[in-house]
Image: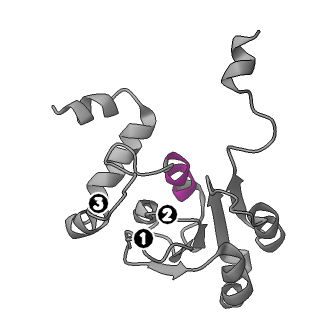
Amino acid sequence: MTDTEKTAKTCPHEIISMELFNMLPKEQVERVFNQYMIDIMPQFLGFITTYKYLSQLIPKHFTIVDLGCAYNAQCFLFTEHKKYIAVDSFPETERFISKNCEIKVKRISEFIKEDISELNMKETFAILNYVPMWGEENKRIVQDTFENLYVYYPHGGDSPNLKNLLNR
């Protein structure tokens, strides 16, 4: 057993990442992992734990819209769904792509203006998970647009800093 496999057994997120890593096509792993400045690895493919559970909860006949998909390994958790649309604004990033995945390289606000008319909104589920704000009002725009959605921003508001914690 490798050190990575030992570590994965102790952390649920790492277990899910390793399961997903094993689903990824080898040629795509090589293409994505060989790009400059990659910040994922087999035991951390991004914040994908939520995606695993959403893939089990969202009806299979739904189209999934992942707003801020990053490297997009999570698309392989949704291969049984009708369609998976991965939206991200970084054109130079190499991404994973499953058989039902379509990649849109644009800002979230641009996608909403230009592409949602193609969707049956009653059977579309949007995911906005761990996406930085980048000065846009993504959270509000997405909440105003999509009837079925999951939004999670782990930042914002006051957060304690080390200095305040040490002065208690």
- Quadrant of the rendered structure where residue 31 is? bottom left
Tell me whether circle 1 and circle 3 mark residues in contact (CB < 8 Å). Answer: no
Please tell me which residue lies in front, 139 or 168: 168
* Distance between the alpha carbons at the discs numbered 1 and 3: 11 Å
Instruction: Give the vertical position of 34 relative to 153 (above or below).
Output: below
The residue under label 2 is: 70
Q: Mark 2 or 3 closer to N-term?
A: 3
Q: In this view, does 18 lie above or below 83?
A: above
Residues at marks 2 and 1, CA–CA distance in whole angstroms: 8 Å
Q: In which quarter of the image is residue 131?
A: bottom right
- Magenta part of the chain: 49-55
Mostly what secondary structure, the magenta segment?
A: helix
Indicate the quadrant where residue 94 lies.
bottom left
Q: What residue type is labelled 2?
A: Ala
Q: What residue type is labelled 3?
A: Phe
State the CA–CA distance, disc 2 to disc 3.
13 Å
